[in-house]
DNA sequence: AGCATCATCTACGACCCTTAGCTTATGTCG
DNA sequence: CGACATAAGCTAAGGGTCGTAGATGATGCT
């Protein structure tokens, strides 16, 4: 079996698969997460719809491949940020921020990962695996943060991680639902990432001050804004 | 024009419309938010699909009617709880809890209200109106809470309400995504509603202690859980 | 009784997903 | 070089969907 030929074949095939996923992603960004169709992919690719089935066994399979790709990218962003700096609390914060930046930069894919927008689709365990690896990583860093006194005891418990996820996904969900497309820095919700971190520290205050870097665990008190003019506090706004 | 007859006609028509919405809601709970089809409604109703269009001009119109109904119910629950007790912070807390209880009891409708799961659907301003009324109500109660010293200054600002929405919708989103169907009391996330409230108070601590009822604004410190066994901290789990 | 309106139907067009089966291109091996 | 296996494309077709058009029967008013 000449590997060169096999490789050429396989490479061509893999390229087409990636191309299909790229097109599907574009459609998702344009027409909504559940707006991908086999027919539209085929049109964009210049082939007939049944030919798509040479590469994926169903439309849900395409969604699963996108899900897997998103989880991998997400994990890579998280891991990269965690490994880049000091372990413990700074790693947790850096990882979450990297994650959030990736999510707002890929809003459609993020919705596929975090919500359940596609009727009938359920991620396969393989596609879901990176998410569990990420949780494991986060847990280890949180544990380190607790052990070094950067965060109070219990922050690495199930309850602590649940609270962190509530804070983090709350911020992200509100951002994606009410201001999709806004960048991380200027997002109405993501721009208050620091407050979210401080709130977590307020729930699990470190017993003693440590001189390691990272956000100052002082009282979270955002500056009082100019008052009034309430806007949508939930629900997807009609003009979104 | 005899009103009695008109009424009988109109009543019959309204009954059919409600019936259609009830069926659509059932389908949504069963097949997912985006799983409603005109054909399925017609089947359930014992008529042919085109007949449905005598009552709604499109499938998205049906979604909009469901959205409006959900917003109305949501607002009614909130208002009822707010009006039942003392104003200010207790009203805010009671309103949010009533809201959350309604949401977990109607998970599919809640997803329609809070996320964007239906491709192509955007709520009309009329359907969205109750949400704005709710925000207005919430803002007034928060203002009262600030003025009476139950919460620190700035809690009724845009920033404060954004923070409150992050906490609240974060809790709700995680609950709906990871444990749909669980009741409010025993939900993995909703059961920590008290922590969420305490966190908000930690972000805007009252200058002085007041003797009005409501949750104690002491340090949020959930009991350290038995360690390990991390589970999905985000993303919709494959077995949901 | 006559008539307007409403509710329902059938037929149809334009999409969609997916399967079956055929044809053509590509790369391998005698 | 020629025969062959596999990959990748095609057409045809079945069973869905939403939504429109136009005809038919039922309801209730005058």
Image (tube, coloured by chain):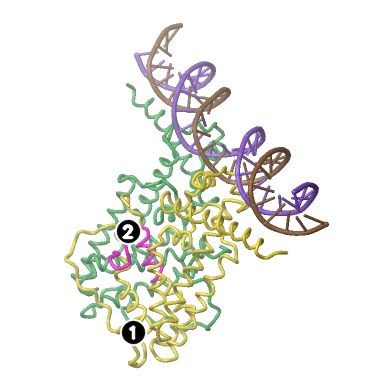
Chain colours: A yellow, B green, C brown, D purple
Residue B214: image quadrant is bottom left
Q: Residues within 10 Å of mark 1 (few under 14, many from 20)?
A: some
Location of residue A31 in the rendering, given as x and y in whole percent from the top left corner: 42, 49
Camera-side residue of D11 and B201 = D11
Whether residue A179 is in magenta: the answer is yes
**The one of A181 and B115 positioned closer to us in this rendering:** A181
Image position of B60 (left or right of A182): right
Determine the residue positioned at 38% across, 61% down: B98
Residue A205 in the figure: left or right of residue B150: right
Q: What number is the disc on residue A214?
A: 1
Disc 1, disc 2: CB below 8 Å? no
- Please tell me if label 1 and label 2 are on a single chain: yes
Q: Is residue A212 above or below residue B175?
A: below
Q: Is residue B120 magenta?
A: no
Question: Disc 1: which chain?
Answer: A
Write the start and end of the magenta stretch as one range: A168-188
Q: Quadrant of residue A48?
A: top right
| Label drawn at residue A90 | none
State whether residue C27 is above or below residue B41.
below
Residue B93 placement (x, y as % from top left) = 33, 67
Position of residue A45 measured from the top left corner of the image (x, y, whole percent): 51, 47
Residue at left offset 44%, top offset 59%: A111
For label 1, the SS is: loop
Q: Which residue is mark 2?
A: A179
């Amino acid at each position: 079996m000449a590997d060169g030929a096999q490789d050429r074949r396989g490479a061509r095939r893999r390229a087409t698969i990636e191309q299909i996923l790229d097109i599907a992603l574009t459609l998702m960004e344009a027409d909504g997460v559940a707006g991908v169709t086999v027919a539209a992919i085929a049109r964009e690719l210049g082939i007939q719809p049944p030919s798509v089935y040479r590469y994926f066994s169903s439309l849900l399979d395409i969604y699963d491949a996108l899900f897997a790709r998103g989880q991998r990218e997400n994990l890579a962003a998280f891991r990269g940020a965690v490994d880049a700096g000091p372990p413990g609390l700074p790693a947790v914060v850096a990882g979450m921020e990297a994650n959030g930046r990736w999510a707002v930069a890929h809003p459609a894919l993020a919705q596929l990962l975090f919500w359940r927008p596609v009727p009938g689709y359920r991620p396969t365990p393989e596609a879901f695996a990176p998410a569990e690896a990420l949780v494991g990583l986060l847990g280890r860093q949180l544990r380190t943060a607790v052990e070094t006194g950067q965060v109070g005891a219990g922050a690495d418990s199930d309850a602590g991680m649940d609270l962190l996820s509530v804070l983090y996904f709350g911020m992200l969900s509100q951002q994606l639902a009410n201001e999709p497309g806004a960048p991380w820095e200027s997002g109405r919700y993501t721009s208050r990432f620091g407050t979210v971190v401080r709130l977590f520290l307020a729930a699990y205050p470190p017993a003693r001050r440590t001189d390691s870097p990272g956000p100052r665990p002082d009282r979270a008190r955002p500056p009082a804004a100019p008052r009034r003019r309430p806007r949508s506090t939930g629900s997807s706004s009609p003009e979104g």
